[in-house]
Amino acid sequence: MSLDPPDSRALRPDAEALRQAALRASWTRDRRVARRRVAMRWLAWAFWRYGLALLMVMAFAAAVAAWMLNVSQAGLRSPRFTVVPAPSVTDAASPRSTETPPNRQEP
């Protein structure tokens, strides 16, 4: 007397069908891995060929832009020393020499 139900053979897959399904899954995975590896090789080649040069050009452009921004903002800052103008001719009451350099003041 068997403990298996009468239709148990229909529920079990055939060994050959199971082997074919496993091979199909393995081949599918193998193709996917191969495509991924080839894509990574192409990306690495393209980066070393073009990406590195592009990265260097972008870094140089950013450095030039930062330098230009610094130069343009330098004119907006107050100077370190301010020049006091020489006394006008109407203030000739005091006997000063006209050849003295202008006085400098700290801001």
Image (cartoon, rainbow, N blue to C red):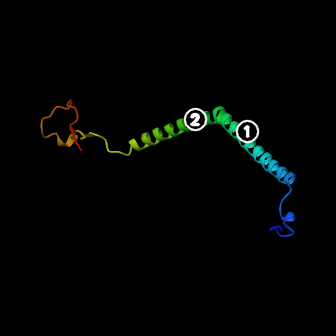
Residue 57 - label: 2
The count of marks equals 2
Quarter in which the C terminus is drawn: top left
State how far apart marks 2 and 1 are (Cα).
28 Å
Q: Secondary structure at mark 2?
A: helix
Q: Is residue 90 left or right of residue 66?
A: left
Image quarter where the N terminus lies is bottom right
Which amino acid type is shown beneath numbered disc 2? Val
| Element carrying mark 1 | helix
Residue at the extreme top: 99
**Alpha-carbon neighbours of circle 2 within 10 Å: few (<14), some, or many (≥20)?**
few
Q: Position of residue 105 (x, y in %)?
A: 21, 40
For discs 2 and 1, the disc positioned in front in the rendered view:
1
Q: Position of residue 31 (x, y in %)?
A: 78, 44
Mark 1 surroundings within 10 Å by alpha-carbon count, few (fewer than 14), some (14 through 19), many (20 or more)? few
The x and y percentages for residue 94 are: 12, 39
Position in image of residue 69 (x %, y %): 46, 43
> What label sits on residue 38 in the rendered view?
1
Within the image, what quadrant is residue 78 found in?
A: top left
Image point (31%, 41%), residue name:
79
Q: Examine the rendered structure and indicate whether residue 89 appears above or below residue 99.
A: below
Q: Mark 2 near mark 1, Cβ–Cβ under 8 Å? A: no
